[in-house]
Amino acid sequence: MVINPLIQNNNFDPKTRLTHVTRLFYLQHVFAVNASLGPKNFDELAAYAKAHPKTLNYLTPSLSKVAFMEEFNKKHGVDFVRVPFKGGGDAVNSMMAGTTPVAIFGIGNLIQLIRAGKILGFAVDGDTRSPLAPEIPTFKEVGYGIHTWASSFGMHVPLGTPKPIVDKLNAAIVKVASDPEFQKRHMIARGLSPVLDSPEHFANAITTDAGLGRDVVIASGLYPDVK
């Protein structure tokens, strides 16, 4: 909805093709490090990277986190390199093997390894800590507020869908997904933070996110044609 229209020439513009129903949830990511590496916070990680140049890789599926890592590299004079993966299983296996010891990944994918002490969580994105690991601070709490907004998922329908149908869908989704037991089992347990806003609020938020998205694409350095 936000990034792809900027980086892909596929003639699909969500603003002219879709009506937004509700933002369902945020997918919270955690900055995680293989515990065997040694560093226990961002400062120690930066010092380790300086002492071991051209040896450290990281993984993340989120372009905003690529932008964050580029800023981290510049701030500390280090050279973390991103390694893309096709799927979450391979990514986690590489992290545990130490080949790619740093990850910014969905906390639901890593929480059992964090609880087992095999992976250390330095920070989570978003405005609040994760109920799965309330001991891990947010990026903002540890002084890293740039490009750390959380990824989100929403429900959309084709543009021109009658408003009564949009409103009916919204009401039905919100009713089901607002149930505390449903949220606990199907959202919170998977590292998802429920939102469930109105169509109007979601549409305004998408517009705001589009501005942030352009900043993220530029900061990532991966798409030099985007100005």
Image: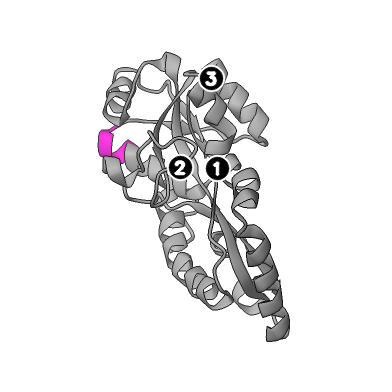
- Residue at horizontal 63 percent and vertical 79 percent from the top: 16
Does label 1 or label 3 sit earlier along the sequence?
3
Q: CA distance from mark 1 to mark 2?
A: 7 Å
Secondary structure of the residue carrying tag 1 is: loop
Does label 1 or label 2 sit earlier along the sequence?
2
The magenta region covers 73-77
Quadrant hosting residue 79: top left
The residue indicated by pointer 1 is 191
Give the class, few, some or many, for how many residues have Cα within 10 Å of label 2's Cα (few <14, many ≥20): many
Give the class, few, some or many, for how many residues have Cα within 10 Å of label 3's Cα (few <14, many ≥20): some
Say whether marks 1 and 3 touch (CB < 8 Å). Answer: no
Q: CA distance from mark 1 to mark 3?
A: 25 Å
Given residues 114 and 99, the one toward you in this image is: 114
Residue 25 lies, with reference to residue 166, above or below; the image says above
Quadrant hosting residue 152: bottom right
* In this rendering, position of residue 74 left or right of residue 216: left
Question: Any mark on residue 130, and which?
Answer: 2
* In this rendering, position of residue 53 left or right of residue 180: left
Residue 5 lies, with reference to residue 179, above or below; the image says below
Q: Nearer the viewer, mark 3 or mark 2?
A: 2
- Residue type at mark 3: give it: Thr
- Residue at horizontal 43 percent and vertical 24 percent from the top: 56
Q: Residue 163, percent across and down?
A: 68, 85
Q: Nearer the viewer, mark 1 or mark 3?
A: 1
Q: Residue 61, percent across and down?
A: 56, 42
Quadrant hosting residue 129: top left
Q: CA distance from mark 3 to mark 2?
A: 27 Å
The residue indicated by pointer 3 is 99
Say whether marks 1 and 2 touch (CB < 8 Å). Answer: yes
